[in-house]
Image (cartoon, rainbow, N blue to C red):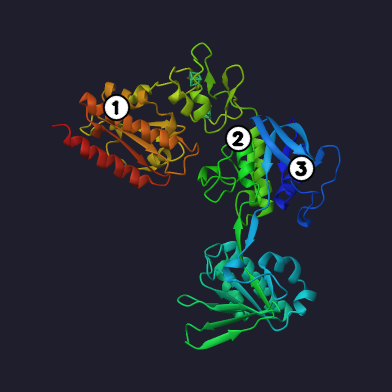
Amino acid sequence: MGDPVFIFGDTDAAWLTARHLRAAGAEVIVASGRTPLETPPAAGRLPETPGVELLPGAVPTGCRGAAGAFEVSLVVGGRPITRAVSAVVIAEAEERLPLLAAYGVAPAAGVVSLSRFGRDELSPDAAAGKGPQVVFISGLFTESHPHMAAEVMRAALKLQTERGVHAAILTGNLKVASNGLEALCREARAAGVLFVKFTGTRPEIRQGADGRVSIDFIDELTADAGRMRPQLLVVDEQPAPSRAASELARVFGLETDGSGFGQADNVHRLPVATNRRGIVVAGGARSIGADPATEAASAVLEILGAVAAAPGDRAAIEPGRCIRCLTCLRVCPHHAVTLESRPAVAPAACERCGICAAECPRGAIRIPGLEADALPAEITPAASTAAPRLVAFCCSRSAALAARSAEVLDREALTVVEVPCAGRISPQMLLGPFGRGAEGVLVLTCHADNCHSREGRGFAHRRTELAAAFLALSGIGADRIKVVSLAANMASEFAQTVADFRRNLLTLRT
Ligand code: SF4
Ligand code: SF4
């Protein structure tokens, strides 16, 4: 693999990834902001042998280069250092924000957060001293996260069945939509865990000077007033990205999801890929409740694929044509364009989306097999049908798959042109078919937030609008071009889109 793999985080997912990589013969650097690094029991200790460098108290400050040849800058113990690494794994733990304030209580002998309860209070000795009742509150005044709901139910079940402690769960909206949670809920009820649900009323929670709480409520089924005075109140938590997540995303050039986790909401990135080839996010760095062993295995597979020799079909810039406008540097969503004395594409980072080639004002970017603005020879369909002749540009990750299984009438009058990303479709490609006998052009992209190259869909929509405006001005008609978003499993919608578009084109014939 060449240079070591840089792993940031000291979670189960991080250490398991390090162990797998060492087993495969790769060297690793494990770094974390924490001092000292703490190997979680589940991952086992990684020996400090040749091939393993540990960097506690590390703060990443920069990451240049591409898969196989990154240079990571860090500050360790106040001293700036750099490391040449082949790949990067970010596997920090998520944060857990206790919702104590939301319920109007403070930590005390009688009130703990869910994490603290799991860490300190669930041991047999601790639980034995808790008396007859422990009350959990989860999703009472706020939405509960399914992972938190699972933790609450497991802890309550354990108290009830193994510790002889009566457990109750007060909830407003307990999320049981994840795998196995319905069954867990049934098991807990069957074991005697009391579930009290509040839909129209709220319990009143008061904390006394001794730290213990009393809970007054109206039973919504019987309308009777009730009171609980548990020995211990366990309060649920809101999962969130680590405090360093946004800075790590900035330093490593990563797109984040709506909550700030280091993997954008994008089905094409699952399980652990990011917008930068060779940089993966695992465990709590990308989502809540992911299984560390699965995350580690996925991270290793992704890295091995990223550092394998880059195929020879990546984008390349022709120096003689380039005017150094840096458009390609700005538009590349995968950080594959670098700038030394002139812009260049790092083949190992290039995803061959074609966005740069479509945007380059000089046609200076060549992508083997996707020559700029060249349309397939078969673009003029057989004239054996009365159906309007169409060209449909389809993203190979979505609409092209739908097109293959769609039952389209008069298929010989439809030319499907597969592109690696809808962002590859240049204005010349959109207009070219009209000079070759096509009566209409369809542009079929991924849905919003589902584009593997993030911006490809947006580029396609904007260019189609411009092409429509040009067609309107030239008298050909804006209605002869249309952009639609389709997923890979939308074969019948593909056929319907073609049929509807053709029907519209027939009205333009007269
Ligand atoms: S967009 Fe084209 S002309 Fe501009 S810097 Fe890139 S390769 Fe050169
Ligand atoms: S083809 Fe896509 S990934 Fe490759 S350099 Fe161009 S914009 Fe970047």
Judged by depth in the image, the label closer to the viewer, 2 or 1, is 2
Q: In this view, does 356 lie to the left or right of 378?
A: right
Q: Report which residue position mark 2 lands on.
A: 277
Of 24 and 317, the residue lying toward us: 317
Tell me where residue 216 appears, x and y as whole percent. 56, 83
Residue identifier under label 3: 30
* Residue in the picture at 67% in, 34% down: 62
Determine whether, in the image, residue 461 is placed left or right of residue 330. Answer: left
The answer to whether 173 is drawn above or below residue 416 in the figure is: below
Under circle 2, the secondary element is: loop
**Badge 2: residue crowd in 10 Å (few <14, some 14–19, many ≥20):** many
Q: Is residue 219 left or right of residue 106?
A: left
Q: Which mark's residue is nearer the viewer, 3 or 1?
A: 3
Circle 3 crowding by C-alpha within 10 Å: few under 14, some 14–19, many from 20: many
Residue found at x 31% / y 25%: 431
**Lower position in the chain sequence, tag 2 or tag 1:** 2
